[in-house]
Structure formats: C-alpha cells, structure tokens
Amino acid sequence: MGGPLRGARRHRGHLQRRPPARDRHVGAPAAHRRRRPGRRQGAHLAAPARPAAAGAVPLPLGRGEAAEGYPRPWSVHSWPEGERPAVGHLARPELLAADPAAFTAALHRVGTAGGPPAFRSEPLASRDARTRAALAHLAGEVDTRAATTAWEAALRAPDHRGPAVWIHADLQPGNLLVTGDRLAGVIDFGCLGLADHAGGCEAAP
C-alpha cells in the first residue's frame, strides 16, 4: 500500500494503522479508508455525535481526499486505550454488559440535526431476498425453519414511530475496547448515523 496509508493494516471493512501493543496509548493513530463509494465516511461525521462520558472514542486527527491511486476519502484518528474483550477472560462480564448500554443511551441523547442515515437504517423488508437466499445456502448447517420463523416474525413487527436517533450500528465485541472488566473505548464509527433505536441493540444478545 503506497501513498498516505503506507504501512496500514486491514481490519474488517477498513484499513487501520495501529501501533504494537507495547507502544499503544491514547492518541496513537489509526488510519481508516472508505472502501465502498456509496457509504459515507462515518468517522468524519462522528465527532459531534460521540457521547463524552460513555467511554473513550477515536478522535479525528486528520483527513484526506482521493489521491495517489486511492479513489476515496481517508482519515487518521487517535486510538483509545484498551484491548478487545475475550470470552472467559472477564472476571465480571456483567459490568461490561452494562457499559455498552450506557454508551448507547448516551448516543441517543445527542442532537440529530443534520445527521445522515445510519448504514443499517433501511427497513428489514429491503433485506428479505438476501436473508432468504442466505438461509437457503445454510440449509443443513443451521435450523433454517426456526431461523425463517424468527425472520418472518421480525418482518411483521410494526414500523418504528418517532424520531430517529444516533446509533453506532456495529456495536459488537470487535469494536469494543476494555480495561479490566469495564468498557474503555468504542471504535469503528464507519456505520454511524440516524436510525430506529433498535438498530443500536445488536450487542444485546
């Protein structure tokens, strides 16, 4: 990888530049690049929507536009302290269960004026064909009858009524950082935006 992101490493949907564990500290940079042209760069949009008292979040240090062979925007952010949680390594996992809920509630209280829709804000019905195709592909590996019943029940749920709120939209263990048994930081705001409250509950299971 050349240009401004030379030396970065991939992490799921983004390219991230992260220092070795022994050198990590608040302020260590992480570089993110957008991979899909239709997706907004949530990291650029996140700053005004980040709750200040619900765990550290990456802070923007710089951003750039398409150049040197890379056709989309990129950005550099600080990296909060902490490590990703590991199953069986938390003495009191119930504490970590409560912290993302507090983070989500704080995010919901942030003003929404001018906010974009979240990456996962579309109605479930728009994912129906893809979901059924995935279930057909998994036949014999999972209980597709039970999964289809649950999916169809979700499709029958009434539409959300009321204003949209900010959601992280990807609040799963790989995007949480912990110190001890407590949430220390939240990363990867690439899907951030406005949506139904339910879109922020993916961590609940």
Image (cartoon, helix red, strand yellow):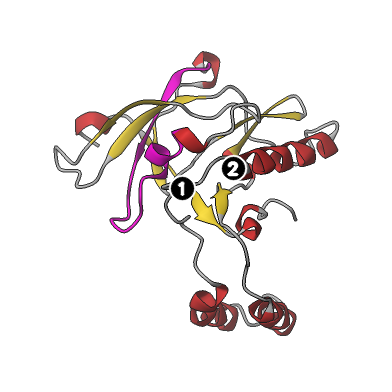
Nearest to the observer: residue 42 or residue 110:
110
Label 2 Cα crowd, 10 Å radius (few <14 / some 14-19 / many 20+) = some
* In magenta segment, residue 35: yes
Name the residue beneath numbered marker 2: 174
Q: What amino acid type should be assigned to the residue bearing mark 2?
A: Gly
Q: Quadrant of residue 147?
A: bottom right
At 46% across and 46% down in the image, what residue appears? 113
Task: Return the residue found at the far left.
Answer: 68
Nearest to the observer: residue 70 or residue 120:
120
Locate residue 95, reporting x and y percent: 81, 34
For the N terminus, give its image quadrant.
top left
Kind of element beneath mark 1: loop
At 58% across and 22% down in the image, what residue appears? 81
**Can the viewer see residue 169 in this picture?**
no
Question: How far apart are labels 2 and 1 at the CA level?
Answer: 9 Å
Name the residue beneath numbered marker 1: 12
Lower position in the chain sequence, tag 2 or tag 1: 1
